[in-house]
Amino acid sequence: GGGGGGGGGPRAGGGNAANKKKELKSYFEQNPIDPSKWVAGTVRSTTDFGAFVDFGAPTDGLVHVSQLADARVESVADVVKVGDKVKVRVTNVEAGKSRIELSMREYIDPVQALIGDDEDSGPWGSNKDVVLPTEGPMQGELNGYNDTQAPLESAFAMAYKKAIAKKN
């Protein structure tokens, strides 16, 4: 099976384009973008690069092929077809181009992804296997350091103290 379907996307005629932008702006003023929030939609058309979904906005949004599933997608047709009811998240809106980007992938909080739920998780997995060197060039700096000691002073803190001392 191939890509199928044409573009249900933003194909506004000349005089209509300005109107479309206004409609889009007002729609998203009333429905602020929240990338973590799921909304229901219907697949209107599919292309090789994604699926256009009607979710109630004045313009159909595009779910790019990379946003159709958490796993790699070879073909849009493997995941959705026209008429399918889908859950989408609005990830970006370019009102100037009447473009709405959608995702069907699980929401990952960018901050949470960096810090993880606890000290053992995060984008790079567990840190249990990290071994600090006890000999070699960094030995002096790490030996004897433990979590109960006061943290090392930042360069800013040291410079600030120096400046205050100079002032007085």
Image (cartoon, helix red, strand yellow):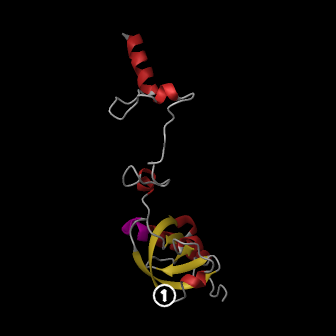
From what the image shows, is residue 160 above or below residue 48? above
Q: Is residue 29 left or right of residue 95?
A: left
Q: Nearer the viewer, residue 83 or 93?
A: 83
* Span highlighted in magenta in the image: 26-34
Q: Position of residue 59 (x, y in %)?
A: 51, 77
Quarter residue 158 falls in: top left
Residue located at (45% from left, 75% from top) = 88
Residue identified by numbered label 1: 84
Residue toward you, 129 or 119? 129
Above or below residue 65? Residue 107 is: above
Classify the position of the N terminus by image quarter: bottom right
Note whether residue 33 is visible.
no
x then y, percent, for residue 48: 65, 79
Residue shown at the point (55%, 65%) measured from the top left: 96
Q: Residue 29: x, y in percent?
A: 40, 65
Seen from this angle, which residue lies furthest right?
Answer: 2
Amino acid residing under circle 1? Asp
Does residue 84 appear to the left or right of 5 in the view shown? left
Taking the magenta stretch, the answer to whether it contains residue 32 is yes
Q: Residue furthest front?
A: 135
Rate crowding at label 1 as few (under 14), some (14 to 19) or many (20 or more) other CA atoms within 10 Å.
some
Q: Nearer the viewer, residue 54 or 127?
A: 127
Could you tell me residue 114's position as x and y percent?
45, 52
Quadrant of the image occupied by residue 55? bottom left
Q: Which of the image's four quarters has the C terminus?
A: top left
Position of 16 with respect to 3 (left or right) is left
Instruction: Decide if residue 60 is on the left or right side of residue 47.
Output: left
Question: Vertically, is 117 above or below 65?
Answer: above
